[in-house]
Amino acid sequence: MIGRTLRFAVTLLTIATRSTVVEAEEIRVLSPVAMRAAMPQIAAQFETTSGHKLRVEYATAGAIADRVKKGEVADAAIASTAQIDALLSEGRIMAGSRSQFARVGVGVFVRNGTARPDLTSVANFKRALLEATAIGYGDPAKGGVSGTAMAALVERLSIATDLKAKTRLFSDSQAVLTAVAAGDVAIGVGLTSDTVLAAGVELAGGLPAEVQSFTYYAGGVVSGSKQVEVASKFVAFLTSPAAKAVFSAKGFEPQ
């Protein structure tokens, strides 16, 4: 009788252990490079509170949208709200899972210890670009939001031709700021949240209000995910008070 009871207890313990293992899932999250300042802390908080693991992979928002559109396997994706909405309409993001959680503006970066450009007016900003020895921003073809916004802005200001010879395009914001820190470009353009991506640079300020461009970010569960419940919890966590506090501290404006 004692032996039977012991065997039963061991069986229950084995089942409980297996259940615990099953419940602790790992999900794959595709996150924009722009989120690299905030995502590690947010991911750590989610893992602590939920008991689940995140495998976060970074790329430009445009690359993420393109990969999800082509059917890449993932559980959750973050991109601009417009990109997530497009994927939602195409059935690549699960209906009802989309959540907008933050916005961020475009900023101007310079090397530590160098003069900051005057950003108090559009005219002064335009003059600073024209007088700079070299400027850098993300290659619009790569899909980064700040690079796309800057390319459109120089066209709007009718200075694209004047800047062409001294404009350097980079793969992402981190590469832009690295070039600023090295002195390869005098002015770098990225998101105001990008300061932590490279040492030796400082944020001169956001673009003048008249030409400022905000990018809104949203997340969603990727269609075909095998971990829909956990992925949904993660997307919802992006609007939690804990996540909002992190976003605020890293230069984003929670929504």
Image (tube, helix red, strand yellow):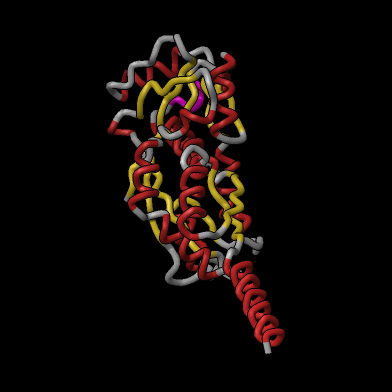
**Which residue is nearer to you in this view: 6 or 215?**
6
Q: Residue furthest bottom?
A: 1
Location of residue 122 by image quarter: top left
Location of residue 240 by image quarter: bottom left
Q: Is residue 204 above or below residue 41?
A: above
The residue located at (53%, 21%) in the rendering is 199
The residue located at (56%, 65%) in the rendering is 222
Percent of width and height locating residue 220: 48, 61
* Image label count: 0
The residue located at (67%, 81%) in the rendering is 6
Percent of width and height locating residue 80: 46, 51
**Which residue is nearer to you in this view: 223 or 163?**
223
Magenta-drawn stretch contains 160: yes
Location of residue 117 by image quarter: top left
Magenta-drawn stretch contains 227: no
Q: Is residue 163 left or right of residue 100?
A: right
**Which residue is nearer to you in this view: 196 or 45?**
45
Q: Is residue 244 left or right of residue 183?
A: left
Quadrant position of the N terminus in the picture: bottom right
Percent of width and height locating residue 141: 59, 41
Percent of width and height locating residue 89: 48, 68
Q: Magenta-highlighted stretch: main secondary structure?
A: helix
Is residue 223 visible in the rendered image? The answer is yes
Q: Is residue 247 left or right of residue 145?
A: left
The residue located at (59%, 68%) in the rendering is 20
Magenta residues span: 159-163
Q: Is residue 30 above or below residue 155?
A: below
Is residue 162 visible in the rendered image? The answer is no
Q: Is residue 101 left or right of residue 54?
A: left
**Which residue is nearer to you in this view: 185 or 252?**
252
